[in-house]
Amino acid sequence: MAQASDLYDERLQRIKTAVALAKPDRVPCVPLGDSFAAKLVGEKLSVFCTGRPEAAYKTMIRAFTSLGEIDGIQHAGFDANMLSTIWLSKVRMPGVDLPEDNLWQVEEQELMKPEDYDVIIKDGWQKFTDDFWLNKLDNLGARVQPFFASMPAAMQAWKDLGIVPFSPVIVTIPYEYFCGARSMREFIKDLYRRPDKVQEAMDVVMPVLVEQARQLARGLNLHGLWVGGWRSASEFLSRPLWERFVFPYYKQIVEALVDEGAIPVLHWDSNWTRDLEYLLQFPKAKCVFSPDGATDIFKAKEVLGDHMCIMGDVPAEMLALATPEKVTEYCKRLISEIGPSGFILAQGCDIPPNAKPENVRAMIASVHQ
Amino acid sequence: MAISHSLITSAVSRLQEAKALELVKEAMTRDQDHFLILEEVRAGLDAVGEIYNQGNYFLADLIMAAEIFMEVQELVVGANIPVEPGPPQVIIGTVETDIHDIGKNITIATMRSCGLRVLDLGVNVPPRVFLKSVQDTRAPILCLSGLISQSYDTMKKTVRLLDRDSLRPATKVIIGGLVNEEVRKYTGADRWVKDCAVGTALCKEILSSNSRSCQMTGS
């Protein structure tokens, strides 16, 4: 029987081959499913989601090692407070603000005011977020610290099983932070009413985010990082706005990560189909485009197939409602039409808590058939 | 007067917020008919909808257009005064288990800016609250919003309650958010949409088809 370290090397090589746009011995499968893992092992979401990072990653390991052979896992652990760090929004927690088995959800609230752009420009991003975490997000730093501290052990635990913790850290662009903190509607209005001020603040924030991303990649010796995109999707913005407030910032962060030798995993939810061609400006065979089912993945293959590995995109709706046969059929289509070179099979976004286990098993099994 | 009003339409359609508001204020100081001012704004919003349908405006542009409409409405008729009085034509809410409301709120703003009367039940709305609201108002359209897959079961329960109380087909159920045809079938809803402009157009289509049926049957 193969040693875990041999398996790890074999699987890492398989993933890296796909990222390099070459053809691996088979398509790798690298899923993500935090709430799903809890449900699968019978743990209440209120118990799983926060304050017990070590137990949470063990739950994820228990769940995913029972579903078939996977090559990697996108996130090594979970704490719902982490969502506040990337959206600068409060998160409603099961068992506290929601029923015990409800999914945690980001609360849409205007926590940052228009005048805060000036504070950011004057005092800098670090000082602003220190204050924001403490005063607007109820001392977020203290709540996420145990999760951050658990990361190295969580990554090692997956490695010890021969499973690659592929992209355990999330970074993103100023747009996503501002949009979360201002609330989407207020932020969109800012883009029309005070575009120069927004851009000035973004340009103050960006070097800090790039440096943080570099340090994370270096410090944790990461293979990949999620470069998250949610509300900055093409479907929400006209191209002039997208070209000004979104793309240049992604380009900076992607180039910095590639420079560090890390793989930017563009975890981009919602529909980005319109602007896929812009991704050709990112370094070739160094990134992963990971849509959630809303972007046309087949169009992505057409535009990016010779330039960027694609990962995805079995939709949440399918995993929750369809039959294993349907899931297998879709996965086979993905493997043959998006792959077999330059493709990693995964769910779109995240496996939902009410996904049928047999559907997730069918997804994982499809790369072995 | 005609020149001023066409300028209002043009400013709204180009999403020139400050200019549109300035023109509206100017028209009001000249004692222009408030109804006509709002009609000019609506014409601008129709143009925004057209440009959106052509794929040249996006969600952010709809948000801005609805914002301009709300500001004009407040200027012209004052805050919290419905422009279109009467019972709701559309009841909308994010279903129980889900608190996402960005899409729902943008949809409501778009619908209202198109002249629809909308009753917003908020987020995390239980099936029985939707049922009671339909019973009380007999609204012809119920929109159920959900952005997590756990919301499917609540949508299904709500549709079942409406069926049980024979409130369908008089009330059409539209689901929106993380939905597709598979989800529509599962929940038993009449239609599904992922786009607030499409949802608004669909509601208008249903209302207009209801009104044609009423005319034909003489009811």
Image (cartoon, coloured by chain):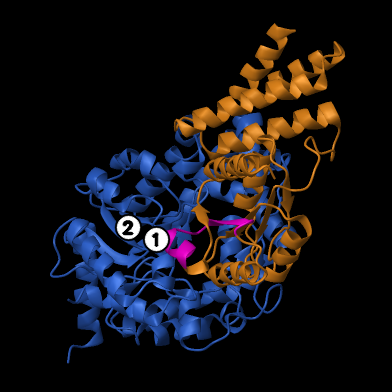
Chain colours: A blue, B orange
Residue A331 point in image, percent of width and height: 26, 67
Q: Residue at x 67, y 46 (%)?
A: B108
Quarter of the image for residue A323 reads: bottom left
Residue B206 is situated, as x and y percent measured from the top left of the image, at 58, 45
Q: Residue at x 41, y 85 (%)?
A: A63
Number of marks: 2
* Front-most of residues A19 and B178: B178
Q: Label 1 belongs to which residue?
A: A225
Residue B171 or residue A106, whichever sits in front: B171
Residues tagged by mark 2 and mark 1 found on one chain of the structure: yes
Determine whether B37 is above or below A7 in the image: above
Chain bearing mark 2: A
Q: Residue furthest bottom?
A: A1
Residue at point 66%, 55% (across, down): A108
Residue tagged 2: A263
Q: Are marks 2 and 1 in contact (CB under 8 Å)?
A: yes
B2 left or right of B33 in image: left
Amino acid carrying mark 1 in the image: Leu
Amino acid type, label 2: Ile
Q: Which of the image's four quarters has the N terminus of chain B?
A: top right
Q: Which residues are magenta?
A: B169-185
Q: Is residue B11 above or below residue A341?
A: above
Q: Position of residue A215 (x, y in %)?
A: 44, 58
